[in-house]
Image: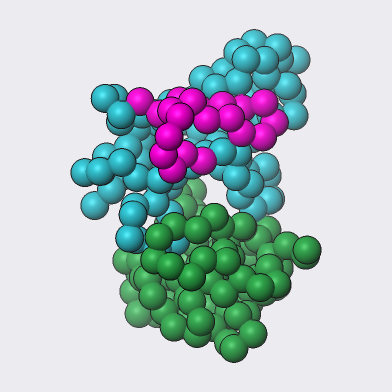
Amino acid sequence: KAGVTQTPRYLIKTRGQQVTLSCSPISGHRSVSWYQQTPGQGLQFLFEYFSETQRNKGNFPGRFSGRQFSNSRSEMNVSTLELGDSALYLCASSAGTALSYNEQFFGPGTRLTVL
Amino acid sequence: AQSVTQPDIHITVSEGASLELRCNYSYGATPYLFWYVQSPGQGLQLLLKYFSGDTLVQGIKGFEAEFKRSQSSFNLRKPSVHWSDAAEYFCAVAVTGGGNKLTFGTGTQLKVEL
């Protein structure tokens, strides 16, 4: 099976712009989670989507949003970019259906740089 | 809210030496526990996980971890480190009923001296 795919791998934006990142989960997986990784804050959970519905959300401002399509692919969007949004954004997919934890498989990440 | 502490930010060991990375968690009940490894520019790879049962868990690449409820710890060990083990290691927890949300520790950067 192909792994989790994230596009683009690298992105450079300027403050105030918006950005959309894409994640294609492992075939058959219906859950997609997003994480932000920065040197200062470490790895932080953004949100999780399952069957096109957000079912879990971290503590991030409303500028961070996401969605999931019927084919389970997911996008996350960051509006009005700030310098502090520079980070590695990781996507993880899992096959889980229940609210109990299901093993997640991580993609390589998208490196976002905000200038 | 649950939290995960990895007290060692950096650790340097010689190739062939043993390794122990520490992890402590704070949570009312026993959470699901994980160790991940991240090489530069890469995503996260799961080394091992603990859900229940035997408190000594075997993982990939020769790693093992021991869950100690009394100490709220889940330390990662390897008897003989290889130069290719140099990477960053993250301990993480997930809570029952919390879906797929992982809470990570701050990570331990492992350097291996030849």
Tell me which residue sits at (64%, 65%) in the image: A110
Judged left or right of residue B71, residue A35 is right
Picture coordinates of residue A78, whole percent (x, y): 48, 78
Q: Work out whether residue A96 or residue B94 is closer to the camera in this orientation and state it.
A: A96
Question: B41 or B49: which is nearer to us?
Answer: B49
- Is B30 situated above or below A93? above
What residue is shown at x 53% (from left), y 78% (from top)?
Answer: A76
Q: Please determine whether, in this image, residue A108 is positioned above or below residue B14.
A: below
Residue at image coords 29%, 25%: B71
The C terminus of chain B lies in quadrant? top right
Left or right, A28 with reference to A68 = right
The answer to whether any part of residue B16 appears in the image is: yes
Q: How many numbered discs?
A: 0
**Residue span colored magenta:** B49-68
The verdict on residue B59 being magenta is yes
* Relative side of A65 to B63, left or right: left
Q: Position of residue B81 (x, y in %)?
A: 68, 19
Q: Colour of chain B?
A: cyan
Q: Colour of chain A?
A: green
Which residue in the rendered view is the most extreme toward the right? Answer: A1
Decide if residue A78 is in sight here.
no
Q: Position of residue A85 (x, y in %)?
A: 47, 66
Answer with the quarter of the image where residue B75 lies.
top left
Apparent side of residue A11 relative to residue A56 in the rendered image (left or right): right
Q: x, y percentage for residue A93?
A: 58, 65
Q: Is A101 placed above or below B31 here?
A: below
